[in-house]
Amino acid sequence: MVQFAHASMGEGTPGRPPSGLQRGVQARITRLTYWSLPLLIVFAVLNLSPNIPLPWRIVMLAAEVAFAIVYGTAAVRLSLWQRDEYWREQGREPKHPERFPNDRSQE
């Protein structure tokens, strides 16, 4: 039996590739880290370096605030997407998970 490398990381069933949902989550998290880690490293180095003029500090602060807003929005969207996928797997409508799929009496 062939074991896939990603099965050892707790993803999917041992011996089977991960599902499309797991690949989607991996792709979204990879996209977040692809853009965030380099910027975090740059911001950390620039913030720890001494003798940066005040105008550059103000520009860096504005860039960091913009980055935090964009990164926070992306993280919230990832969380909401995961929640919706969970309810779809359960056979429920993500906007109204308390309703059963064939139950129209609550409308």
Image (tube, grey):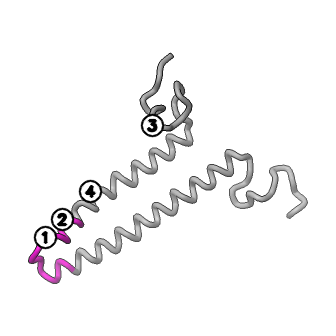
Cα distance between the residues tagged 2 and 3: 32 Å
Farthest residue toward the left? Answer: 51
Magenta span: predominant SS is helix
Residue 85: where, in percent of width, then height?
A: 62, 50
* Circle 4 residue: 38
Residue 104: where, in percent of width, then height?
A: 87, 57
Q: Secondary structure at mark 4?
A: helix
Residue 67: where, in percent of width, then height?
A: 34, 68
Q: Secondary structure at mark 2?
A: helix
Given the image, on which type of amino acid does mark 4 rest?
A: Pro
Farthest residue toward the bottom? Answer: 54
Given the image, on which type of amino acid does mark 3 rest?
A: Met
* Circle 2 residue: 45
* Circle 3 residue: 9
| Quadrant of the image containing the C terminus | bottom right
Mark 1 residue crowding within 10 angstroms, few (<14) / some (14–19) / many (20+):
few
